[in-house]
Amino acid sequence: MSLTIWHNPRCSKSRQTLAILEESGQPFTIRKYLEDAPSRAEIAAARDALGLPVSGLVRKGEKVFKELGLKDAGEDALLDAMVAHPILIERPIVFKDDKAVIGRPPEAVRELL
């Protein structure tokens, strides 16, 4: 039963989610996903753990989303874009075993604790 957070230290929701994990006292791993970008397979596994379509993991407000014209993109194109531009991955995502939650709101992480 290990916890991992895909964390962006510049994101307030990610920092708030991290604080909840720290307060829980449970051991966890921090993955700064902008520096250590997830592979296509890891993003697909995140999709499965979250039970969402790939479009549910994409930050549609990011500048690069608009620049790449991803509004009507299919799942394969979105996965490829997230691999190439990890800033497009919704944050934070917390994983525990085969489950995951997006920390929006940060309190959502409590369902994994």
Image (cartoon, rainbow, N blue to C red):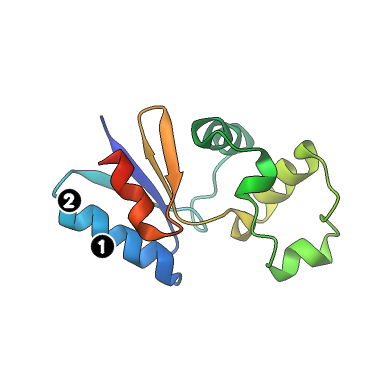
Q: Is residue 64 left or right of residue 7?
A: right
Which three-letter amino acid code belongs to the residue tagged 1? Ala
Q: Is residue 71 left or right of residue 48?
A: right
| Image coords of residue 41 (percent x, y) | 60, 31
| Image coords of residue 59 (percent x, y) | 64, 59
Which three-letter amino acid code belongs to the residue tagged 2? Ser
Q: Which residue is mark 1?
A: 19
Asked whether residue 30 is in view, the answer is no
Asked whether residue 77 is in view, the answer is yes
| Image coords of residue 69 (percent x, y) | 86, 59
Look at the picture and state if 61 lies above or below 44: below
Which residue does the image show at 58% across and 39% down from the upper left?
43
| Mark 2 secondary-structure assignment | helix
Q: Which residue is mark 2?
A: 24
Q: Is residue 73 left or right of residue 32?
A: right
Q: Are marks 2 and 1 in contact (CB under 8 Å)?
A: no
Which residue does the image show at 17% across and 51% down from the upper left?
24
Q: Residues within 10 Å of mark 1 (few under 14, many from 20)?
A: few
The N terminus appears in which quarter of the rendering? top left
Q: Quadrant of residue 47?
A: top right
| Image coords of residue 42 (percent x, y) | 54, 35
Q: How far is disc 2 from disc 1 in space, using C-alphas?
A: 9 Å
| Mark 1 secondary-structure assignment | helix
Q: Nearer the viewer, residue 56 or 36?
A: 56
Q: Identify the residue at the far left of this view.
A: 25
Of mark 2 and mark 1, the one earlier in the sequence is 1
The C terminus appears in which quarter of the rendering? top left
Q: Nearer the viewer, residue 100 or 64?
A: 100
